[in-house]
Image (tube, rainbow, N blue to C red):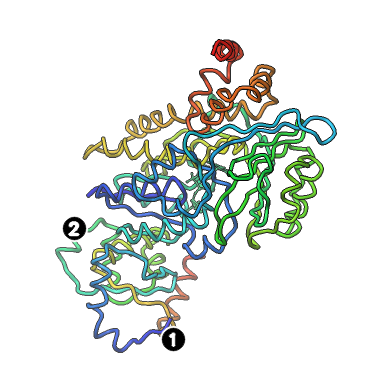
């Protein structure tokens, strides 16, 4: 049995650990927090996940909340115009539903499942000096510690990281009692609202500790009106402030949220981080090497809601590389190749996500406008949230976009 | 947590067994705290020789009950690593993790050793 250590009990670490167990590997996960602490802690994300990522979970029977979480059937786009109106407002249908399960429920449950299925868990925040001596006790050490301090083991790759500063200031609340979007009262959809010069408001239907909920999520432009969380307001004040900003900048969403209430006292989050791609192999003073995964090595801004999807895809890709390796050593060359294989999946997501942080170019506004009239365009756009590689074929390039619009017009 | 140190000593091997069988699951919440005590169930020289040097050092030290803090200080191995080594040895059923509880707070000797270990760690 090959011995593998995984540091970090998030989407990437636990999905990898759980699937490796199924293939008979001896897996130890080190988690900074116990399931009880995770459940009782603060929300961590909005975690909307699309079909491909969800299917990786189903393949290993990890979809324990599939029946509880609202089925997200579409993605909508609204762009504010003048005087509280909207220049644009449409929704496109997903071929397969998306879902968002509060990571507090999911990671706590997965940790317990991992133990039930015979994995070893050690509750301990890992330091680099721990790792230095641990590498020789395992054949492979994966670092899946998200954006925590261990990322310092991995150097930033400037060729793949166009930004060096925070591009959006994030702010999230989980609430009960919101009304459905009036445009589609019978259907759950992720709503993507843009107010130029201010930022974005996502709304994601999810499931939390106390049942189905809605998750409003601001992506504020730094220095703009949505960048106002540095005083770390208490939960109640946080939601009140979000609501007031909604009333001012996204009045159509405010209408359905004005009577909503926080799901619990830990249901708010604010912060921000610069998007970054890192080198995948970390070297320790002892000469031992470790392989970074998911957010550790590719941390995109959440503006496109792809981080958990990427973490799931990374877990699936690394799993394949590990299985294919058989009994041969997990050396540096294998690590580099394993990452490049994942990079070929995540590169299009990174390119698209980095593009979405800029004001939309003319051809994108043109596509969005035409999409209001043409269901096929809407559908192609929203289904690319599941398969972002498709954006490169039409959305990101002005000429390809024009060509695509001509094809659509021909029918 | 309530501990019954008397009955425990007698039934130690039967307590270790289910833990070993489940492959070291911590669901029973072996809290590996600095003051957690461990000891070798039945010393086995052959077994010791097969261990990696750090694990072997832990195994040898635990021939008499010892706390994680003491182990870390005496062997000069980071606490996080001690936790992993201990967890692995327990999963293999060769050491016993004593339940954390009040039992030791009355044993001044052990308390002093734990404190001493902690002092050395922070020094
Ligand atoms: C506001 C916000 C909204 C988002 N919305 C979405 C969305 O809608 N859709 C989407 O797909 N993605 C979204 N994301 C991104 C997504 O949450 C992350 O990309 C994803 O969780 C990354 O998974 P991971 O496993 O790499 O890391 P994480 O989920 O961060 O897990 C890392 C784990 O490692 C642990 N850890 C850290 N350091 C140590 C240590 N030293 N020792 C032991 N354990 C350690 C942490 O406690 C944590 O449990 C969002 C992110 C944010 C911030």
Instruction: Give the quarter of the image for residue B38.
Output: bottom left
Residue A229 appears left or right of A376:
right
Residue A323 image position (x, y, % from top left) = 27, 39
State whether residue A301 is above or below residue B123.
above
Residue marked by disc 1: B108
Label 2: few (<14), some (14–19) or many (≥20) C-alpha neighbours in 10 Å = few
Residue A66 image position (x, y, % from top left) = 45, 51
Residue at left 47%, top 70%? B118
Identify the subunit bearing mark 2.
Answer: B
- Closer to the camera, A118 or B57? A118
Identify the subunit bearing mark 1.
Answer: B
Residue A112 image position (x, y, % from top left) = 40, 61
Q: Is mark 1 within 8 Å of ligand 1?
A: no
Instruction: Specify whether residue A296 is in view.
Output: no
Residue A102 appears left or right of A176:
left
Mark sitting on residue A218: none
| Disc 2 element | helix
Mark sitting on residue B50: 2
Mark 2 in CB contact with mark 1 (< 8 angstroms) = no
- Closer to the camera, B105 or A11? A11
Label 1: few (<14), some (14–19) or many (≥20) C-alpha neighbours in 10 Å = few
Are labels 2 and 1 assigned to the same chain?
yes
Residue at left 68%, top 37%? A168
Cα distance in 3D space between marks 2 and 1: 35 Å
Whichever of callouts 2 and 1 sits on the residue coming sooner in the sequence is: 2
Residue farthest front in this picture = A186
Q: Is mark 2 within 8 Å of ligand 1?
A: no
| Disc 1 element | helix
Instruction: Specify whether residue A34 is in view.
Output: yes
For the C terminus of chain A, give its image quadrant.
top right
Residue at left 23%, top 37%? A328
């Amino acid at each position: 049995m090959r011995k593998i250590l995984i540091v970090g009990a998030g989407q990437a670490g636990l999905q990898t650990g759980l699937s490796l167990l199924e293939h008979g590997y001896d897996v130890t996960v080190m988690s900074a927090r116990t399931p009880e602490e995770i459940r009782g802690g603060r929300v961590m994300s909005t975690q909307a996940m699309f079909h491909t990522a969800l299917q990786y979970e189903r393949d290993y029977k990890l979809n324990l909340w599939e029946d509880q979480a609202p089925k997200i059937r579409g993605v909508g786009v609204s762009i504010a115009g003048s005087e509280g109106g909207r220049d644009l407002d449409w929704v496109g249908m997903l071929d397969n539903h998306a879902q968002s399960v509060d990571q507090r429920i999911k990671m706590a449950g997965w940790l317990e499942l991992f133990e039930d299925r015979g994995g070893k868990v050690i509750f301990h925040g890992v330091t680099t000096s721990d790792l230095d001596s641990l590498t020789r006790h395992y054949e492979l050490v994966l670092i899946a510690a998200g954006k925590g301090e261990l990322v310092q083991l991995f150097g930033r790759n400037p060729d793949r990281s166009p930004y060096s500063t925070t591009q959006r200031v994030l702010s999230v609340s989980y609430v009960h009692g919101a009304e459905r979007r009036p445009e589609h009262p019978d259907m759950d959809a992720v709503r993507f609202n843009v107010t130029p010069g201010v930022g974005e408001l996502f709304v994601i239907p999810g499931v939390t500790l106390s049942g189905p909920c809605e998750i409003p999520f601001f992506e504020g432009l730094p220095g703009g009106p949505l960048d106002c969380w540095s005083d770390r307001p208490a939960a109640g004040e946080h939601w009140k402030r979000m609501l007031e900003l909604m009333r001012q900048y996204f009045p159509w969403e405010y209408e359905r949220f004005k009577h909503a209430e926080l799901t619990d006292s830990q249901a708010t989050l604010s912060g921000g981080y610069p998007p970054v791609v890192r080198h995948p192999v970390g070297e320790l003073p002892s000469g031992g090497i470790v392989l970074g995964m998911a957010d550790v090595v590719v941390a995109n801004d959440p503006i496109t809601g792809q981080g958990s999807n990427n973490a799931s895809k990374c877990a699936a890709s690394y799993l394949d590389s590990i299985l294919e390796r058989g009994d041969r050593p997990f050396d540096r060359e294998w690590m580099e190749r394993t990452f490049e294989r994942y990079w070929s999946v995540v590169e299009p997501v990174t390119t698209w996500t980095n593009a979405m942080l800029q004001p939309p170019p003319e051809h994108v506004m043109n596509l969005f406008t035409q999409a209001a009239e043409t269901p096929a365009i809407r559908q192609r756009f929203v289904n690319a949230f599941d398969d972002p590689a498709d954006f490169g074929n039409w959305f990101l390039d002005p000429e390809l976009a024009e060509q695509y619009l001509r094809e659509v017009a021909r029918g | 947590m309530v501990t019954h140190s008397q009955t425990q000593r007698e039934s130690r091997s039967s307590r270790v067994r289910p833990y070993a069988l489940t492959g070291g699951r911590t669901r029973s919440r072996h809290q590996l705290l600095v003051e957690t005590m461990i000891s070798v169930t039945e010393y086995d020289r052959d077994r010791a020789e097969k261990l990696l040097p750090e694990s072997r050092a832990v195994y040898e030290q635990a021939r008499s009950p010892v706390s994680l803090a003491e182990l870390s200080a005496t062997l000069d191995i980071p606490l996080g690593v001690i936790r992993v080594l201990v967890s692995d040895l327990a999963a293999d059923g060769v050491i016993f993790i004593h339940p954390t509880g009040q039992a030791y707070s009355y044993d001044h000797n052990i308390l002093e050793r734990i404190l001493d270990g902690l002092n050395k760690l922070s020094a």
